[in-house]
Image: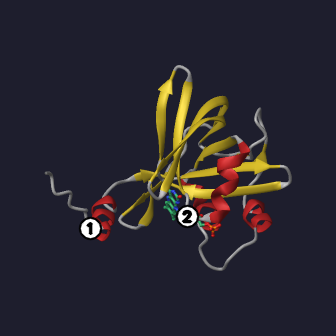
Amino acid sequence: MLDRQRMDPALYRDAMSRFAGHVQLVTTALGVERRGVTITAACSVSDSPATVLICLNNSNAKNEIFFKSGIFAMNTLGADHQALADAFSGKTPPLTVDERFAAGRFETLVTGAPVLADALAAFDCRVLEIKQASTHNIIFGEVMAIRYSEPKPALLYMNRGYHTL
Ligand SMILES: Cc1cc2nc3c(=O)[nH]c(=O)nc-3n(C[C@H](O)[C@H](O)[C@H](O)COP(=O)(O)O)c2cc1C
């Protein structure tokens, strides 16, 4: 029988810190409630139909809104958005939801999810499927509307800090 060894989570995180991740601000809304979370676990799935996936920690009760609302926007952040990335990653000082959203200019396109007006690219999605994978939920979204800016420097996260490209 195969003896399944568990990889040390700290070792895994150390190795992953070498990974250069693009930084996304994912947002959703349900009634009058809104939420945004800074993430790097996101990628394209397909261009036909246009589909993306995002991974959100399911042990944070505040993320429940993403699992219920049926919509989200994936806003790709530029180099000029580091303060916004900090605001939406729970960095100190703790900010209210309204204070976090006041750090950017948000609009809606098709689904009603908050779209960052000056994002490098914004993908307005309806949820297709949610798959639980241990600590995280993988949310697949069909892209219903897109907006993108002129090319400008991107915000990356690597070696436990922000970089620009
Ligand atoms: C660079 C960076 C990448 C992150 N990536 C993810 C991610 O992929 N998925 C996730 O659930 N949380 C991720 N987080 C953590 C969330 O941003 C953070 O837990 C959350 O915003 C805390 O918000 P709260 O204070 O409202 O609970 C990341 C944080 C940072 C700084």
Q: Is residue 98 above or below residue 53?
A: below
Can residue 41 be seen in this snapshot?
Answer: yes
Q: Quadrant of residue 107?
A: top right
Q: Residue at x 53, y 35 (%)?
A: 52
Q: Looking at the picture, how far across and down is residue 153, in whole percent?
A: 51, 48
Q: 91 left or right of 8?
A: right
Q: Is residue 43 above or below residue 142?
A: below
Along the line of sight, which residue is nearer the eye, 111 or 62? 62
Q: How is the image coloured?
A: secondary structure
Residue 71: mark in rendering: none
* Beta carbon at label 2 within 8 Å of ligand 1: no
Along the line of sight, which residue is nearer the eye, 83 or 98? 98
* Beta carbon at label 1 within 8 Å of ligand 1: no
How many numbered discs sit on the rendered protein? 2
The three-letter code of the residue at mark 2 reads: Ser
Q: Looking at the picture, how far across and down is residue 126, in whole percent?
A: 67, 34
Q: Is residue 142 above or below residue 12?
A: above
The three-letter code of the residue at mark 1 reads: Asp
Q: 160 left or right of 128?
A: left
Q: Residue at x 66, y 50 (%)?
A: 66
Q: Are marks 1 and 2 in contact (CB under 8 Å)?
A: no
Q: Quadrant of residue 14?
A: bottom left
Please tell me which of labels 1 and 2 falls first in the chain: 1
For mark 2, what is the residue? Answer: 59
For mark 1, what is the residue? Answer: 8
Q: Residue at x 54, y 30 (%)?
A: 51
Mark 2 crowdedness (10 Å alpha carbons): few <14, some 14-19, many ≥20: few
Q: CA distance from mark 1 to mark 2?
A: 20 Å
Q: Quadrant of residue 96?
A: bottom right
Q: Residue furthest front?
A: 1
Q: Quadrant of ligand 1?
A: bottom right
